[in-house]
Amino acid sequence: MVRKIKKIYQGRQTVDGAGVSLNRIFSNSQVPEFDPFLLLDAFGSDDRSKYIKGFPWHPHRGIETITYLMEGSVEHGDSMGNKGVIHSGDVQWMTAGSGIIHQEMPKGDKNDRMFGFQLWANLPASHKMMQPRYRDIKSADIPEVAMNDGVKIKIISGSVNGIKGPVQDIITDPEYLDISIPANTSYLHKTKIAHTCFAFLFEGAALFSDNDSKLVNAGAAVLFEEGDEINISTKDKSARFLLISGKPIGEPVAWYGPIVMNTKEELELAFKEYEEGTFVKHK
C-alpha cells in the first residue's frame, strides 16, 4: 500500500543556541505526529554571523541528537572528554541517555558556507537513563547505493537492497537515508508499515504518493500516512531529500529546552540535578 501524504510542513525561521539562524521544520508543537522524532532543524548560511556563535555548553537527557553535515565543519566536545570535528558528509549520532553536557561550534568552510541538519529522536522510558554514547561517522563510511534510472541513496541507518548503514542497534529502529533522484524519474521505496515516516526535501522538487499531484519544493517536509511503500517522482527538476522513519514510542512527552522526559517531575529533577552539579551520571 502506497503511503499517502498526511501533511506538508514548511518550517519557520528562528534563532537558537547563542545566535544560530535556522529553519525549524517541526518541533514540540508537532508531538506526537512525528513520534519517535521530536525536532528537525535545517541550518545553512554563507554569513558567519548567522552561525559562528554556535551552541555553547548545554545539557541533554532522554534523547538522541543526529547531526548530518552537508557543507562546512562543526567542532564538538562533551562531559565524557570527547573532542572532535565533523566535516561535509559526516554524521554525529549522539545518544544523550542519562545526561551529557556538550557543545557544538560551527566553523563553516573556506567560503564561510555552512549547511546541515539536526534531528532529535526520542528515547522510550526504558532507555531514558541509558549510558550516553557517541557515533561519529565519516562520509567515506556511509555506503551509497546506485539504483535504476540514476537514483542514488546514502544509507546512514537502515538498509537498502541488503546493504546496511553504519548506525545500527538503535532502539527506535530508525531508517535515515539521503536520496537523490534525477529529473523525470520515479522511484518506489519500501517502508515498515507501522513506522512513522517523513521526507525533507532540500534540493529541487518532487511528487510524493500516487494520489497526490501537488509538487513539493525544497524547504518542505512531507509526513506520510501508514503504508509499506512510498512513490516518489520528479518532473523537469531533480530532487534530493532526507527520508527518515522510525518505530513510534507512544509514551507521554514532558519536554523543556534540551531535556525530554516522560513526566513533569522527571523534568524538574533533571534541571535540579543540573543546577546542583549532579546531572552527569556517566563515568
Image (tube, helix red, strand yellow):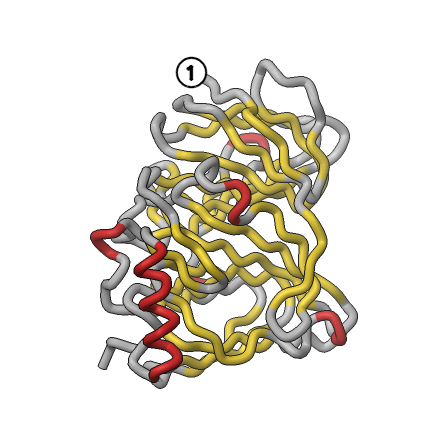
Q: Is residue 139 visible?
A: no
Residue 41 is situated, as x and y percent measured from the top left of the image, at: 59, 55
Residue 207 is situated, as x and y percent measured from the top left of the image, at: 65, 26
Q: Is residue 180 visible?
A: yes
The residue shown at (67%, 68%) is 20
Name the image quarter holding the C terminus: bottom left
Left or right, residue 229 beside residue 150: left
The residue shown at (35%, 74%) is 272
Looking at the rendered structure, the kind of residue marked 1 is Met
The residue shown at (49%, 54%) is 119
Name the image quarter holding the N terminus: top left
Quadrant housing residue 60: bottom left
> Can you identify the residue that label 1 sits on?
1
Q: Nearer the viewer, residue 177 or 119?
A: 119
- Is the residue 163 above or below the residue 148 in the image? below
Quadrant housing residue 7: top right
Quadrant housing residue 11: top right
SS at circle 1: loop
Q: Nearer the viewer, residue 32 or 103?
A: 32
- Is the residue 47 above or below the residue 10 in the image? below
